[in-house]
Image (cartoon, grey):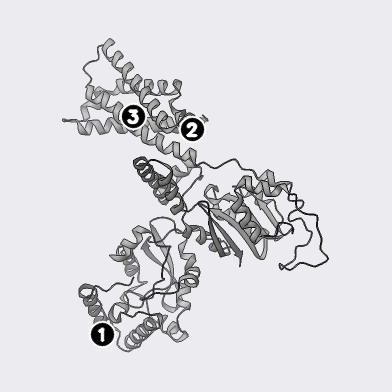
């Protein structure tokens, strides 16, 4: 066990004992304050014995050395041993005035906390990334992707010849992944033509040492779940590709991860683990106060990433997803380099988001909302539009960017509550056209775009008055509202407000 790992376990045990002690005092009748004074010295002795026995018994390394059931059993036995030692000391030192409920209740709850921690640690270790084997492919870089000049297109001169790629590259790819991945690569890359770089790495160092704007294709066989700084990695890949080049990579999406966990482990245990996995891997990274703790515990390895976040990160880093394929529980993608990265220094990742929207006079304003989509999903509007088009009401059809909680928030307008901040700041008014993203705004006619920018967007759009179904009907509804508003601002908003409220309450009008 490393010093870092030992420190994490010791810190967790101390916090677990404190939490268990506080919990048992809360359960026990009477005032808790006298117990803290009475148990002060005994508590220090108790923690010292607990940590000492735990270390010499190698209790903390149990999840690494044995099966889950044996690991849990071993930890319970060690804690029973500690309980026995404590009981003997209490008897020998005549300290029987200590409450047995407090002492052994603290041991019981601490054991429960340790079991939960051990279960999570065991599954994390099982899914831990394998050793970085980028060096395996370094010998191929002299053959694969080593031309002095790479053609700017995928049409190669007839006179160009090269010795065949070593046959064992197939075995190497299969060893790193599987035969299905090799077939997928073979379908999209001619492995005998040196226009690509083949990597199996989780660090951008192995990408940074490649020549700039040199390759037509870069392949990475390691899943991005184990990359510490994903966007920096993608940006490095972008720099190494020529314009129009392709990046092929893979990810285990959150849905694939959930399916794997529920299938791999016993019926009740899988749900317990998935719950804690959700809290640790999906909730902790979302808040600034817990994000550092999350990365300290996990080092950013084996993180949970949705398909929407993966594609959104790619788009933000200058790529456009061309195709995708699920292979043995992982999602493989092919993305084309279309531009330079955005280098977004303030990505929306937490529960509260700032969305860039077109406001009055074409000014870009930050609209505040509760998150209803996966992180980086805002970069995927063009992708969703190309793949899904629009459904009735002007929303995207089959929008995989929306989370389960997000669907509930949208149904009851919970996500729009923070927009009251924009109302107080003067960015929005109560009634007005909906604030739109640049891409959605570009779908509107030039005439409507010009009229839209003459006034502030609003919290209550004319949609709830006319209930349009198609994009053309939505534009017609907004055009009618704007024409009326520019002539009679107050009366128009007054009339639209009450009509919208009537439709929302009595006709159950919804925008999604």
Please give the residue where the numbered disc 3 appears in the rendered image: 111
Q: Which of pointers 3 and 2 lies earlier in the amino acid sequence?
A: 2
Measure the alpha-carbon separation of dots 3 and 2: 19 Å
Residue 405 numbered mark, or none? none
**Front: mark 3 or 1:** 3
Please give the residue where the numbered disc 1 appears in the rendered image: 491
Measure the alpha-carbon separation of dots 3 and 1: 67 Å
Where residue 94 appears, x then y in whole percent? 25, 11
Q: Which of pointers 3 and 1 lies earlier in the amino acid sequence?
A: 3
**Front: mark 3 or 2:** 3
Say if mark 3 contacts mark 1, CB within 8 Å: no
Figure quadrant of the C terminus: bottom left
Residue for point 58% across, 54% down: 232
Where residue 187 appears, x then y in whole percent? 64, 60
Q: Which of pointers 1 and 2 lies earlier in the amino acid sequence?
A: 2
Left or right? Give the position of 104 relative to 332. Answer: left
Left or right? Give the position of 176 relative to 96. Answer: right
Which quadrant of the view contains residue 292? top left
Look at the numbered disc 3 and give the secondary structure of its residue: helix
Q: Is residue 492 visible?
A: yes
Residue 5 numbered mark, or none? 2
Residue for point 59% across, 53% down: 180
Where residue 24 appears, x then y in whole percent? 24, 31
Residue for point 41% across, 70% down: 397
Q: Which residue reaches farthest left?
A: 30
Which quadrant of the view contains residue 197? bottom right
**Front: mark 1 or 2:** 2
Residue 356 in the image: above or below residue 76: below
């Amino acid at each position: 066990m490393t010093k870092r790992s030992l420190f994490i376990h010791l810190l967790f045990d101390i916090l677990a004992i404190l939490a268990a002690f506080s919990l048992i005092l809360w359960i026990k009748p009477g005032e808790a304050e006298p117990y803290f004074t009475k148990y002060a010295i005994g508590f220090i002795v108790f923690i010292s014995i607990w940590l000492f026995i735990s270390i010499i018994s190698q209790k903390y390394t149990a999840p690494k050395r044995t099966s889950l059931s044996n690991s849990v059993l071993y930890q319970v036995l060690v804690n029973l041993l500690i309980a026995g030692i404590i009981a003997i000391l209490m008897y020998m030192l005549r300290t029987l005035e200590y409450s047995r409920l407090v002492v052994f209740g603290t041991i019981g709850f601490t054991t429960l906390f340790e079991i939960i921690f051990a279960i999570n640690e065991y599954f994390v270790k099982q899914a831990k990334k394998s050793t970085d084997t980028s060096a395996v492919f370094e010998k191929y870089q002299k053959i694969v992707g080593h031309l002095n000049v790479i053609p700017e297109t995928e049409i190669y001169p007839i006179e160009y010849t090269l010795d065949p790629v070593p046959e064992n590259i197939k075995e190497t790819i299969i060893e790193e992944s599987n035969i299905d991945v090799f077939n997928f690569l073979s379908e999209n890359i001619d492995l005998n033509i040196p226009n690509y770089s083949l990597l199996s790495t989780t660090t951008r160092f192995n990408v940074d040492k490649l020549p700039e704007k040199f390759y037509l294709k870069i392949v990475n066989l390691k899943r991005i779940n184990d990359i510490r700084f994903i966007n920096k990695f993608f940006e490095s890949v972008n720099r190494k590709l020529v314009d129009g080049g392709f990046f092929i990579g893979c990810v285990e999406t959150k849905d694939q991860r959930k399916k794997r966990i529920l299938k791999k482990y016993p019926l009740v245990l899988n749900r317990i683990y998935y719950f804690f996995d959700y809290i640790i891997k999906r909730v902790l990274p979302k808040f600034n106060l817990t994000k550092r703790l999350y990365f300290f515990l996990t080092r950013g390895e084996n993180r949970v990433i949705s398909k929407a976040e993966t594609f959104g990160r790619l788009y933000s880093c200058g790529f456009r997803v061309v195709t995708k394929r699920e292979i043995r529980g992982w999602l493989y993608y092919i993305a084309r380099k279309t531009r330079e990265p955005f280098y977004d220094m303030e990505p929306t990742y937490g529960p509260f988001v700032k969305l860039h929207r077109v406001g009055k006079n074409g000014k870009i304003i930050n609209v505040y909302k509760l998150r209803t989509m996966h992180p980086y999903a805002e970069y995927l509007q063009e992708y969703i539009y190309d793949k899904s088009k629009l459904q009735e009401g002007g929303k995207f059809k089959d929008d995989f960017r929306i989370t389960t909680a997000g669907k509930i928030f949208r149904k009851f307008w919970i996500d729009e509550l923070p927009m009251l901040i924009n109302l107080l700041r003067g960015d929005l008014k109560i009634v007005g056209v909906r604030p739109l993203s640049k891409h959605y705004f570009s779908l509107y006619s030039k005439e409507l775009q010009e009229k839209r920018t003459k006034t502030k967007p609003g919290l209550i759009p004319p949609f709830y008055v006319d209930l349009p179904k198609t994009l053309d009907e939505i534009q017609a509804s907004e055009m009618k509202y704007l024409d009326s508003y520019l002539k009679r601002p107050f009366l128009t908003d007054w009339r639209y407000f009450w009509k919208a409220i009537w439709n929302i309450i009595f006709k159950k009008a919804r925008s999604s």
